Image (cartoon, helix red, strand yellow):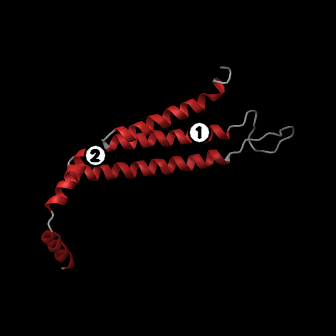
Amino acid sequence: MSHFPGLFNYWIVIFLMMAGFYVVISQGNLVKKIIGLSLFQASAFILYISEANVDGGHVPILEEGITLYSNPLPHVLILTAIVVSVSTTAVGLALIVRIKETYGTVEEDELQEIDNAQDEADTPDQKQQIAEEKEI
């Protein structure tokens, strides 16, 4: 039990990762899926930052008497990953807005029903007519 405080970050990572994964798998709402993916990404960020921490490490600036340095590269990479994460989340939410405008719902099951109904309504004659209209 004396190792538990040292593993606290890893327990947080496991909890966030499993919570995010559960939300992605169990929810049919597209916005909730994006939130679950964001939780999952946050857990990966915490994992990499926790791994980069060196006990007793100092900033990598040459000074007398300091022999143990922490590598700043993982922190910089995670900052870049956070920017990419925010960008992809924004794109995902923008796509969800367009889906809501087009189909009137963001529920995965309802979207599948609408798509299946459209596939059944399309006959070969209708598909040929659409193709001819595109050529004109």
User: What residue sits 49% from the left and 43% below the top?
Assistant: 41
Question: Left or right of 51: which side holds 66?
Answer: right
Q: Residue furthest top?
A: 1
Q: Is residue 12 above or below residue 29?
A: above
What kind of element bears circle 1?
A: helix
Quadrant for residue 59, please give it. Answer: top right
What kind of element bears circle 2?
A: helix
Residue 36: x and y in percent read 41, 40
Q: Which residue is mark 2?
A: 108
Mark 2 Cα within 10 Å, few/some/many (few <14, many 20+)? few
Residue 46: x and y in percent read 57, 38
User: What residue sits 49% from the left and 51% below the top?
Assistant: 84
Between discs 2 and 1, the one toward the N terminus: 1
| Nearer the camera: disc 2 or disc 1 | 2
Q: Residue furthest bottom?
A: 136
Quadrant for residue 9, please give it. Answer: top right
Question: Left or right of 100: which side holds 9?
Answer: right
Q: Is residue 92 above or below residue 32?
A: below
- Tell me the quarter of the image containing the C terminus: bottom left
Residue 122: x and y in percent read 15, 63
| Badge number at residue 1 | none
